[in-house]
Image (cartoon, rainbow, N blue to C red):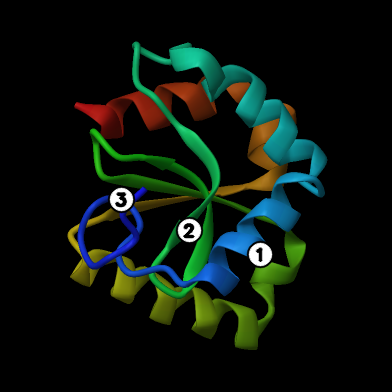
């Protein structure tokens, strides 16, 4: 598997791949619920990857065909420092040509159907 610039990993290092592997085994409840609805091409036939390495980051979900990153944010993302880090990360993703969709944990837990509609709009 090629890990250079471009492709679907955008230069991710071995360390980032290892981190992604670790994160796959400790997904949050909201991430697991969303993954259940995204895995196996269930959403409009699009393939999603979970805890996917991109550059120096691991994103919660990634659809390469749509160049869409989905981040499921917990309450800690409301803190100023975390918000600032998210903004920098989102800018870097956009510089790679990727669209970032941020979804709150509560949205996944309370209204998964609406979340799926929002994601599907971004796929086309």
Residue at the (40%, 31%) spot, across then down: 119
* Whole-percent x, y for residue 109 in the image: 74, 32
Residue linked to disc 3: 8
Q: Residue furthest bottom?
A: 81
Mark 1, Cα crowd under 10 Å, few <14 / some 14-19 / many 20+, is some
3 or 1: tag closer to the N-terminus: 3
**Residue 102 versus residue 51: which sits nearer the camera?**
51
Residue 117, quarter of picture: top left
2 or 3: tag closer to the N-terminus: 3
Q: Is residue 66 above or below residue 33?
A: below
Residue at the (43%, 15%) spot, across then down: 43
Task: Give the number of the disc on residue 19.
Answer: 1
Residue linked to disc 2: 53
SS state under label 3:
loop
Task: Give the number of the disc on residue 29.
Answer: none
* Whole-percent x, y for residue 118 in the image: 40, 30
| In the image: residue 33, left or right of residue 2 | right
Residue at the (35%, 57%) spot, across then down: 9
| In the image: residue 62, left or right of residue 72 | left
Distance from disc 3 to disc 1, alpha carbons, whole Å, reads 17 Å
Count of numbered marks: 3
* Whole-percent x, y for residue 52 in the image: 50, 50
SS state under label 1:
helix
**Residue 58 versus residue 124: which sits nearer the camera?**
58
**Labels 3 and 1 touching (C-beta < 8 A):** no
**Labels 1 and 2 touching (C-beta < 8 A):** yes
Distance from disc 2 to disc 3, alpha carbons, whole Å, reads 8 Å
SS state under label 2:
strand
1 or 2: tag closer to the N-terminus: 1
Mark 3, Cα crowd under 10 Å, few <14 / some 14-19 / many 20+, is some
**Residue 12 versus residue 109: which sits nearer the camera?**
12
């Amino acid at each position: 598997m090629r890990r250079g610039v471009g492709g679907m990993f955008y230069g991710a290092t071995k360390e980032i791949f290892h981190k992604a592997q670790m994160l796959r085994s400790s997904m949050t409840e909201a991430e697991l619920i969303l993954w259940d609805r995204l895995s196996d091409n269930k959403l409009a036939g699009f393939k999603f990857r979970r805890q996917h390495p991109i550059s120096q980051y691991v994103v919660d979900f990634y659809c390469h065909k749509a160049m869409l990153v989905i981040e499921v944010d917990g309450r800690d993302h409301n803190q100023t420092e975390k918000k600032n880090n998210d903004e920098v990360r989102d800018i870097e993703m956009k510089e790679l040509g990727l669209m970032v969709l941020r979804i709150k944990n509560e949205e996944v837990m309370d209204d998964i159907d609406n979340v799926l509609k929002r994601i599907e709009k971004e796929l086309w």
